[in-house]
Image: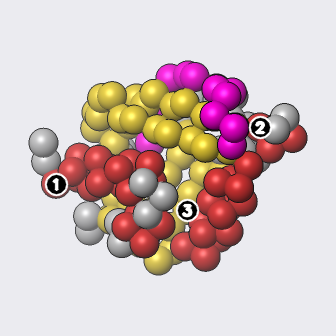
């Protein structure tokens, strides 16, 4: 496993542990991050903090990387298994999704969701 793949695994581990500071240490200051609940992008760590604070107040997501491949553009494409539960523990979503990360100097500069996800619009369904 190369250094970039290690970064991706550390990121998912920190996210699943709700360790924002652990994730933020792996991001560039001007990171562009996919907002899966709204189908948009947000920019910077403060925006991600606000997004996750809201997200974790309405759902409990857990995302496990399954495979990581390097794309032609140098980004890392990650097949993930995503399970999203409501705060009472009921499974709302159980799906496979493709994520893509563009790294710069060992830190994530851009995160995209490359496949359709049931997460989009979930905030109105909880």
For label 3, the residue is 32
Q: Residue at x 60, y 69 (%)?
A: 49
Please, is residue 24 above or below residue 12 in the view?
Answer: below
Q: Which mark is residue 3?
A: 1
Q: Is residue 15 left or right of residue 13?
A: right
Q: Residue furthest right?
A: 124
Query: Is residue 108 in view?
Result: yes
Foreground mark, 2 or 3, reads 2
* SS at badge 3: strand
Q: Residues within 10 Å of mark 3 (few under 14, many from 20)?
A: many
Q: Quadrant of residue 14?
A: bottom left
Task: Judge whether residue 99 is colored magenta.
Answer: yes
Q: Residue furthest top?
A: 95
Indicate the quadrant containing the C terminus: top left, top right, bottom left or bottom right: top right
Q: Which mark is residue 122?
A: 2
Q: Residue at x 44, y 49 (%)?
A: 16
């Amino acid at each position: 496993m190369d250094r970039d793949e290690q970064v991706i695994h550390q990121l998912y581990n920190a996210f699943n542990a709700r360790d924002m500071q652990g994730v933020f240490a792996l991001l560039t200051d001007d990171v562009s991050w996919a907002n899966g609940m709204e189908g948009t992008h947000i920019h910077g760590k403060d925006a991600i903090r606000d997004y996750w604070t809201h997200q974790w107040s309405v759902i409990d997501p857990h995302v496990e990387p399954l495979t990581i491949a390097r794309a032609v553009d140098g980004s890392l494409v990650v097949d993930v298994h995503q399970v999203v539960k409501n705060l009472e523990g009921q499974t709302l979503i159980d799906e496979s999704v493709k994520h893509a990360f563009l790294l710069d100097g060992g830190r994530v500069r851009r995160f995209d969701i490359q496949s359709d996800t049931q997460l989009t619009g979930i905030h109105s369904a909880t």
